[in-house]
Image: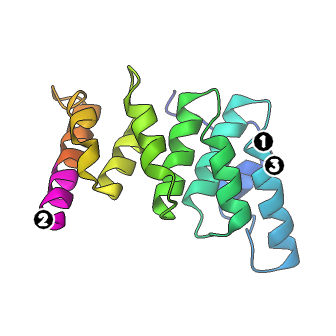
Amino acid sequence: MTENYEPPSDFLKGVINESVPLGGSSFGQANLVRLIEMTSDANLANRDWATFLLAQADLDDVVVRGALRTAADDSDSVVRAEAILGLTNRSAPEALSLVQRELAGDVASIPIMEAAEELADPRLIEAVRVFAAGDDWIAVAARRAMEACSRGAAAAV
């Protein structure tokens, strides 16, 4: 991705700039519905941004979780990772299995490592360890996740 990566959608740019409210009124609710619809947009950049914005929004209900669950199965790994982190932040019960699924692949991402760190589940330690070698940003995030998962193991004893 480039430094100036942004969605082509003016609506999403408005959400990013916080000039488009989400929730709190009928107008905000209509915007939220539109944002959720855009998590399935044909344009990858729009889908990525919509999923990221929904995942980061301070909103949690059945509809939001449903949209994030759907996006967690997206064909694009970045979209999946953002959705999974959003579910993790909402303490969704399926977040652990989704993180495990992503860690079983050949490539990991920062949002998946953040989700593993948030979960702090000792069952993730070995899967995360695979990505912890080196000094790149994924390795650093993997080591943070391993530390959190280790603390989770200690707390469970």
Query: Of helix, strand and loop, which one carries label 2?
Result: loop
Instruction: Kindly report the distance in space between the C-alpha atoms of the residues bearing marks 1 and 3.
Output: 13 Å
The amino acid type of the residue labelled 1 equals Ser
Provide the secondary structure element on which disc 3 rests: helix
Q: Are the residues tagged 2 and 3 within 8 Å (C-beta)?
A: no
Question: 63 above or below 45?
Answer: below
**Residue 157 has which mark?**
2
Residue 110: x and y in percent read 38, 39
Q: Quadrant of residue 104?
A: top left
| Residue at figure coordinates x 34%, y 56% from the top left | 119
Q: What residue type is labelled 3?
A: Glu
List the residue tagged with mark 1. Answer: 9
Assign the magenta stretch its main secondary structure. Answer: helix
The residue wearing badge 3 is 37
Q: Does the magenta stretch include residue 45?
A: no
Pinpoint residue 82: horizontal percent, then vertical percent.
Answer: 53, 44
